[in-house]
Amino acid sequence: MFVAETLLPIFLIIALGFEIRHRGIMTADVQAGLTALVFRFALPALILGSMLTAKGFSIESWRLLEVLLVAMVVMLAVAFVFCRIFKLTGPTTAVFLQAAYRGNWAFVGLPVIQSVFAKKPEVIETMVLAMGPMVLGFNVVSVLLLLAGKHSLRRESIRPLLGGIVRNPLLIACFFGIVWVFSRQALPDLAAPGFLIRTLREFGEMALPAALICVGANIASVPIGHKVRLAVTASLAKVALMPLIGYGLCVWFGLEGDMRRVAIILLAIPTAVSSYIMADRLGGDAELAAGCVVLSHLLSAGSLAAVLLLFGA
């Protein structure tokens, strides 16, 4: 019952977004506007609002970050082995690698964690603290992989893309939030104005349902293509193999309790929709990227259900 109550609302809202976009109730312009509103304002407000009251980095939060970073590196190595087995070319290899490690944390991960740990705000705050370094890592590695895949690792190619990453609203919110957290640790009496916290949180409350609608609408706009076998392999690597790797790393690093649950849930989150957009923009295998986005979201319903059944909350 807990699994159904946790996941069904999330995937039903995603399905609603898919249906209203598929039927044309939501136009492409409305979809783009809603996505921009969520990405540029609502999600950053939610993240910053949570971090303004965070107690700071604990040993467990550092271990969580270690597990997530090492899991990303290990998954990249395993996915590269798959690429060699399938004898993939450069652009296709880059997209396969990106699909296998890059999770949709902002648009799906946050809503899932919020739903699972609704009565434990300190857990959500810790997850948000880990988001900044991980989202930065996701974006930088994805850009480098896609450019390397088409042999375009030149300064003039990388500079504007890295500039776009630095201007990412989620990263900016995480940066200021982390600066605030460290400032509070140095000056314990420091506190943010109550009206600011309330404003950010109330505005941020719209982020989670709106983000899920955007996910569904974006999936409806993405052509799945014909590279189903590769897409299924990459998707299973992302939503099934990566959480297993994460579990092994949690045991290795001694990460237990709620932080272990957070790590495994985040590693079971499907491939980010932005990976398709980035692949299409940088000349990667957009057809494979699209297939991975769609299939990983479908398969994640089963993987997340399995994670919650095994690890609870």
Image (cartoon, grey):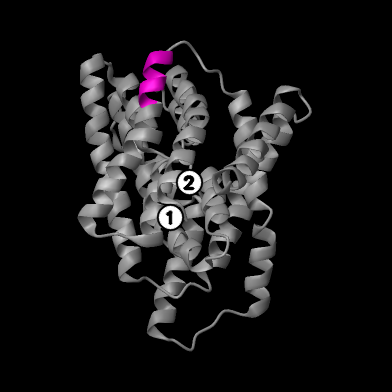
At 32% from the left and 30% from the top, the residue drawn is: 97
- Residue 229 colored magenta? yes
Asked if the residue at tag 2 contacts the one at tag 1, i.e. Cβ–Cβ closer than 8 Å, the answer is: yes
At 30% from the left and 69% from the top, the residue drawn is: 59
- Secondary structure of the residue carrying tag 1 is helix
State the extent of the magenta-drawn residues as a range.
Answer: 228-234
- Residue 105 colored magenta? no
At 59% from the left and 42% from the top, the residue drawn is: 4
**x and y percent of residue 131 in the render?**
43, 55
Q: Earlier in the sequence, mark 1 or mark 2?
A: 2
Classify 10 Å Cα crowding around label 1: few (below 14), some (14-19), many (20 and above): many
State the residue position of label 1: 131
State the residue position of label 2: 105
Up-down relation of residue 72 to residue 301 (above or below): below
In this rendering, would 45 be left or right of 144?
Answer: right
**x and y percent of residue 270 in the render?**
46, 36
Residue 137 shows in this picture: yes
- Marks 1/2: CA–CA distance: 8 Å
Q: Which residue sits furthest top?
A: 226
Question: Which image quadrant for residue 183?
Answer: bottom left
Question: Which image quadrant for residue 71?
Answer: top left
